[in-house]
Amino acid sequence: MKEIKLFINGAFKTSEKSFISENPANSEAVAKVFIPSEKDIDDAVDAAEAAFYSSEWRGMDQIKRAEILEAISEKMKERRNELTELEIADSGSCVRKAKADVHNAASYFKVLAGQLRKFQFETKDESATRAGFSHNYKIYEPVGVCAQIIPWNFPLVMAAWKIGPVIASGCTTVLKSAQETPVTASILAEILNEVGLPKGVVNIVTGGAKEGEYLLQNKKVRKVAFTGSTSVGKKIMQSAGQNLQRISLELGGKSANIVLADADLSIAVDGALYAFLYHSGQACDSGTRLFVDQKIYPAFKDALIKRIADVKVGIPTDTGTGYGPVVNKKQFETIMNYIEVSKKEGAKLLFGGERATGGDLDKGYYIRPTLFEVTPENTIFNEEIFGPVLAITPFSTDEEVVKLANKSVYGLAGAVWSKNPDHAKKIARQLEAGTVWINEYHLLNPGMPFGGYKQSGLGREMGEEGLKAYLEVKHLWISDCDERSKKPWFDAIF
Ligand code: NAD
């Protein structure tokens, strides 16, 4: 069986505590996973600190770091089959989703390398500079040792989004993968060694809340980057406050997907299903609140119910499968509980609402894609489920739908479907969300920022904003007043 060891200072090591991770599709063992002790976590942070101050890493220029990012991307492509198979077994991702994840993670490193090659770590600010008085520069410098914590839903992509900017910025890190899905981050660790990343720059351990909390308390950690639930994000923000650590939070969502009366139904129906069923609903940006214009509501609802029956539920390794299991028993029970609550509250069940069974499905945690017609009072209108459950609500006017869409503590993403781009854009601009698509869903561009408004997070990943989140900015003042007589302000103390 595969062993997932701790990756500390460029070496793989075992620990006293371990467990056997399971495949969510059939409960078969995937790997023996080693959990770090407190000392292991301290060692990882020490290694990250030593690497941060090493002349090898500090002295490495941005072109060389970009080359490392490109080499990681290439190695990931070389090992794409292995990464895909492991991601499927570890996380229950369907084969097409897992392939896309490997491709997207590899592409991200490549795009980031391109950004890094162009990024100006030192710029002269001409507007602040006054000839004969001062020259003023902005110098961007790495924040330092980072602690990064990721969730289980897109294990490889999440690891890439964290490790990429660490290398690009010249920071160092201890990344804690999710205990539910630690396998592909460990392959990434092997790749980091293969491409010659100096040891200690990236250290990877796994574990749960206990290990995460312990890591964040280390006073050598200067920046925390967390992706996960809003409830844990709030705790992390409090803990980061103790040492005023820099912080990036990518949290939960309850994104609004708005279908206007003039939408092209031949794509909007499939788009609405794709928005909430991708990865069995376990995507942070899922369009889980669907708003449909009253004028087309009955026809749209009928089309949705008809089309959802075509979603291919099956085992993740089957290339024909579009929709697989949820990650584990706990998540399965959480989702089923939300379904029961909705039924009790009187939300109208339009489709699904039960376990998917029969043949191989009996071995895993499968839930039928589920549609409910709801009002804003229903629990599932407001709370993130992180599963394949859609809350549908009709609306009558633009003002009403904007109000309904923004009636959420979250603000991660959203979409508008319309044949009129100006109308769609007018609504998109009013949505309180970090990413809004028009006639599209889920697609991300690594050159553009991703993150949340309101309780969906703080800061951005990807794009220039994502790189700057790992940099401090220094104002460098070079005086032009090179004679004592040109510095009358010194006289203030005489
Ligand atoms: P979670 O918050 O339970 O756990 C996330 C990570 O934090 C895991 O590695 C976990 O071990 C760790 N953790 C848990 N408690 C901790 C604590 N007290 N201190 C330190 N670390 C702790 O989330 P999850 O169930 O793994 O993932 C699902 C959530 O992640 C959803 O809310 C989803 O929306 C969110 N998510 C957000 C994004 C985004 O980019 N905004 C992306 C993916 C997932």
Image (spheres, rainbow, N blue to C red):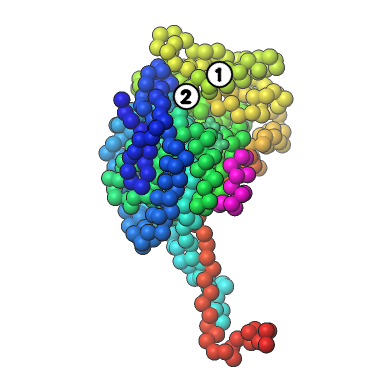
Count neighbours of disc 2 (C-alpha within 10 A) and say few if under 14, some if 14 to 19, many if 20 or more.
many
Quarter of the image where one finds residue 401: top right
The prevailing secondary structure element of the residues shown in magenta is helix
User: Which residue does the image show at 53% across and 22% down from the upper left?
Assistant: 330
Q: Which residue is mark 2?
A: 327
Q: Which residues are magenta?
A: 234-246
Residue 241 lies within the magenta run: yes
- The furthest residue to the bottom: 485
Q: How crowded is the residue under tag 1: few (<14 C-alpha within 10 Å), some, or many (20+)?
A: few
Whichever of callouts 2 and 1 sits on the residue coming sooner in the sequence is 2
Element class at badge 1: helix
**Beta carbon at label 2 within 8 Å of ligand 1:** no
* Amino acid on which the number 2 mark rests in the picture: Val
Residue 473 picture location, percent across and down:
52, 62
> Magenta segment: does it hold 422?
no
Please provide percent x and percent y for residue 237: 61, 44
Q: Is residue 461 visible?
A: no
Number of residue marks: 2
Give the residue number, with chain letter if any, for mark 1.
333
Q: Residue at x 45, y 29 (%)?
A: 180
Q: Is residue 256 above or below residue 237?
A: above
Task: Tell me the amino acid under the disc marked 1.
Answer: Glu
